[in-house]
Image (cartoon, rainbow, N blue to C red):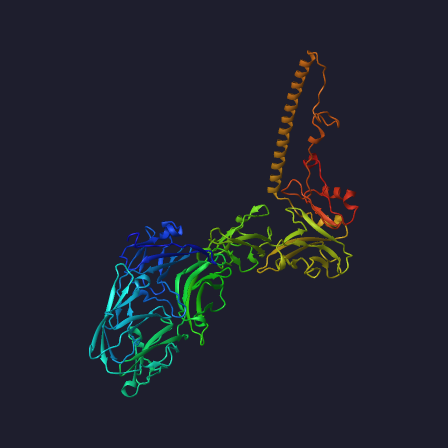
Amino acid sequence: MSDKTMRWQVLLFDFIFFFGAVVGQVTYSIPEEMSKGSIVGNIAQELGINVKRLKSGKARIYTEDNTEFIELNKDRGLLLVKERIDREALCGQTTPCALHLQTTPCALHFQMLLESPMELFRITIEITDINDNAPIFASSEKRFEISESAVIGSKFVLEKAIDADIGVNGLQSYSLTPTKNFELKLENEADGSKKVEMVLQKPLDREQEERISLLLTASDGGQPRKTGTMQITVIVLDVNDNAPVFTKSVYKATLTENSPRGTSVITVSASDKDGGTNGEISYSISNSKRRLSELFQINKKTGEVMLIGEIDYEKVKLLQLDVEATDNGGLSDSSKILIDISDVNDNSPQLKILSKSDTISEDSPDKTVIAMLSVNDPDSERNGKVKCNIHDDIPFKIQNSVDGFYSLVTEIALDREQEQLYNITVTCSDEGVPSLSSSVTLTLQISDVNDNAPVFERSSYEAYIVENNTPGLSIFTVKASDADWNQNARVSYILEDSSVNGVPVSSYVSVSADSGVIHAVRSFDYEQIKDFQFLVKAQDGGSPPLSSNVTVKILIQDQNDNPPQVLYPVQTGGSVVAEMVPRSADVGYLVTKVVAVDVDSGQNAWLSYKLQKSTDRALFEVGLQNGEIRTIRQVTDKDAVKQRLTVIVEDNGQPSRSATVIVNVAVADSFPEVLSEFTDFTHDKEYNDNLTFYLVLALAVVSFLFITCLVVIISVKIYRWRQSRILYHSSLPVIPYYPPRYSDTLGTGTLPHVYNYEVCRTTDSRKSDCKFGTTSRQNVLIMDPSSTGTMQRIQNEKNILDEPDSPLEVGCLQFNNLCQ
């Protein structure tokens, strides 16, 4: 294609889409009949787009009617001719409008689409005409029968030539040869065409020339010029003085599109002043436009024009019919009929999805473009005005971005946890009556992001476990759920670092990461710990992960695993502890009280006291709840002095545990009487041997310590003496030094007072160095059958017996007394 035959012009201007995509419009102008592969233009350069963007954006050409005359070379960014373009086949004979005298250019309209992000560019290619069509006549021959009496100036309508080209390449002139009797007259018409008439300029003489042959030539203005011819034959008839005359030079009619065949359009009428056969008129439609003869026909006798084809407003809006009225003498007149086609709403809006997204992330911002649609309604005025809307209450809206193009965008933030899938139905309706509409449905999947933290089923947990459990025992399960999906909803459980009484909580319990089951790591003891609490974290598998904490409190339940412990009376190994009851005691006299405790709790610590065995069951009783031993009758002289009671203490656990205590009671008014009853107790020989061994061992240890201390003191003394001698020979003053507590202030020898040892023991002590017994009453007796002198010594100690109801202090004897 040379520069002389191709002229193109680029017009670029920017539109700003609502969703931010840049929309451009480019206009090219190329001649028709270009060969395949010819370059239309460099679209990438004109739009300022990098060629790589064409590939990455999946650039493609979109046309509404799916005709592909132009193709896009994405590697070079060029628009190329894909198919031969015939302007006449594409647009027909585009001529000035009969009413407005405006020429509509022949053009290809299509769009170029890009994705990621979505962009749309409108491209218009004007197809210019070349002189590839010669003027032609509908018929090659025209026959006229003209009376020889035809007056000079009589006009005879000739058929118009048709040239599919336009502009200078279209029909430009007519010529008629020879011009002996007739001349050619041209008259401009409203639609831009020319009315061709043959005018008689010299009277006809049938006797001289009965048949005249003329040649009508139509020429265009192209280079080179092309022509078309029609043979005209004039048969000279005898006298017909008057030609038919139409009542109107222009008839106007209105016809609704889609009118049924046989519809009467209009009736034309002409009159002829001649009479007889010369006044008989016949009507015909000019064949200047072949398509019109396929749509209409005229009644030759009545002049009624009938519709015989289908009228479509979207194809043609105004039609012009040329009609002729001819008498039998061959004289004729012409007129034209202008038919205005009115539109009806017979086309639904046409929806096409240009581009769409099948999946969108739930955290996409507002006004994210989901799809782009093309909407077209070929009807006119209100019938062609289209409004689109979305069904249902969903977070999307549709907006008109450019005439005929709509964008579907998000209206608010999306939430996959509320809705995972949307079926979006877009309906476009025109404003015709009745309104016509079309719909299209798009399916949109919402993809998940990690925007929900795990949520526990409870705000806090409280669980119970019985003490003395087996380590590894499952206590209970915490459960958390995550509203997200897949990996984002996969919950793991983690024990938060903390301590219980200074010990890491992980040494008490553990948590299963997958199931949330809490296990006891150790065996619990209610008497050591009664409850503790810790935090469990639930964390999802998202990136970054989200988490939440819950407080778990473990309550240790008590078991009856501890028997009662008797605090009083104290059970000694060999000493006899006796409660003294005077013989004058009345009924209900309080002998003593058994005191016991149970370290368990609840009903496991409820204690009851029972008298299991007694020397005289009729004399004493034990309080069930308080453990008090009282007399149940008057004490008499017949009652034995030595009474032995066995009391059992039981708790209320299941099964119950118990402890037994033996209470010795002396029924007497004086100590000598009691002492005579209790002298039958003898020491065990093994006990005496053991005691002698321990005493010898203690004496050996004390002797060793004494000798060691003596050696150390002598060594220190010598060392100080030698130091003093050194100082004596020196010029420094001599300051004597004494170690602490070294001087003998109490006259007990070289050892300080703190090193004096005293070995004490209680009477009747067996396997301990020193035994202490306490009682709430003054009449508690401690008796050693092997030493009666001890009893007398105790009676003489006023500090033991003078104060009533005070604890009995055990006297301590010097080591030399014990050895007697």
Asked whether residue 309 appears in the rendered view, the answer is no
Q: Visible in this render: residue 573?
A: yes
Question: Residue at position x 25%, y 59% from top?
Answer: 224
Q: Residue at x 44, y 67 (%)?
A: 426
Q: Where residue 118 sits in the image (x, y, percent)?
A: 42, 56
Above or below, comparing residue 424 to residue 537 in the picture: below
Percent position (x, y) of residue 806?
76, 48
Toward the viewer: 480 or 419?
A: 419
Residue depicted at x 68% and y 14%: 727
Question: 425 or 89, which is in the foreground?
Answer: 89
On screen, residue 518 versus residue 200, left or right, reads right
Q: 335 or 53: nearer the eye?
A: 335
231 above or below 533? below
Is 135 drawn above or below residue 311 in the view shown? above
Q: Quadrant of residue 592?
A: bottom right
Number of marks drawn: 0
Q: Nearer the viewer, residue 617 or 810?
A: 810
Rendered residue at 30%/65% (across/down): 171
User: In the image, is 216 to the left or to the right of 666?
Assistant: left
Image quadrant where residue 384 sits: bottom left
Residue 35 % position (x, y) = 26, 57
- Residue 89, given in percent of the width and then of the height, sits at 29, 65
Viewport quadrant of the C terminus: top right
Residue 799 picture quarter: top right
